[in-house]
Image (cartoon, rainbow, N blue to C red):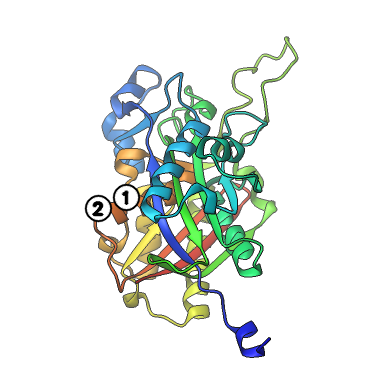
Amino acid sequence: MNRDILDEPTLITVAGTGSAIPSIRVPNDEFVKLVDTSDQWIRQRSGIETRYFCDAHENSATLSVQAAQAALESSGFEAAEIDVIICATVSPHRTTPANATVVQAALGCRAIPAFDLSSACAGFLFALHTAKLWLESGAAQTALVIGAEALSRLVDFSDRESCFLFGDGAGAVVLTSRPSSGGILISSSITSQGEGAELIEVPSAGRPCNPFATDANSLDAIRIQGREVFRMAVKISVESLQGLRQEQGFEWDEIDWFIPHQVNLRILEAIADKLQISMERVFVNLTSLGNVGGASIPIALDQARRQGILESGQRVVMFSIGGGLSWGTALLDFV
């Protein structure tokens, strides 16, 4: 075999995108019934106006299926062409089976690897990078990558500082090394630093069995050290984005859109300010969806594509930081 052929990089494309939003719309005013807060206070703290929660018949697995179906439809690929399914979630419908296997069965895929991946709000970029490695190695040609969360089921609704931040939803992409149009994945990078694990955590993996536990209803809830998370999110995001720019050799004015994890508007504004990036080039949907964890970026990517915001010839940077601490970046060129 020609050595030059072996050395050619594998061209990997985001061929399709899809998303799913659950049915219960929850505006800020609903939280006034639960804690000492107000719509104005929540908007000032986060930029969030509303979010969506799953009803009794919805969960992160059902949302995964809906988003995956939409991504497949937009990609032009058939379920039989999918070689691997990776679902990023910290709120799976069940401990087992994995959400990804539920998607596999629902789509009618053949017997292929299908597994969940847990890396909090950075989960989608971790799943995307993992799928990229599968495609580059030749172990797969087409991957279905999903970010799905039902974070409303992990929220402590008595915590005034954090209960309003989160929402539910799912997003998906079809990633392929087969000939396809869409966004070419130029680069992806992921990192974790466990020393910051206590800043964002869900202390228990399940409800405690001890019937005498006085905090049985709160152990599963998300715990956030807000001020420190703000500082670390800005610092790490700026550093990782600067690293991506240096590695790929571009200037900020060459990036048409930044699609971040929708964590908090104040955090996004602080990152943009430090990098001297206009917020007009930062895609923001947290106003209407809140923080959807690992589903945030693929939902935003799908919305931007379907709204006609992403056009041929544009360059897109995605970035996220979440519990772990874990973070990642990705660079897309749309053709």
Indicate the quadrant where residue 215 lies.
top right
Residue 120 in percent (x, y) is at 57, 45
Name the quarter where the N terminus is drawn. Answer: bottom right
Q: Is residue 117 above or below residue 327?
A: above
Q: In the rendered structure, which amino acid carries the disc numbered 1?
A: Gln
Out of 162 and 202, give the one closest to the viewer.
202
Where does label 1 land, which residue? 303
Where does label 2 land, which residue? 307
Out of 22 and 206, give the one closest to the viewer.
22
Q: Is residue 142 above or below residue 159?
A: below
Circle 2 residues within 10 Å: few <14, some 14–19, many ≥20: few
Residue 41 in percent (x, y) is at 31, 34
Kindly state the secondary structure of the residue where label 1 is placed.
Answer: helix
Residue 35 in percent (x, y) is at 40, 21
Residue at the spot x=33%, y=77% of the render? 254
Residue 62 in percent (x, y) is at 48, 31
The single residue placed furthest to the top in the displayed view is 211
Out of 30 and 190, give the one closest to the viewer.
190
Q: In the rendered structure, which amino acid carries the disc numbered 2?
A: Gln
Does the rendering let one see residue 235? no
Residue at the spot x=31%, y=56% of the render? 305
Q: Are marks 2 and 1 in contact (CB under 8 Å)?
A: yes
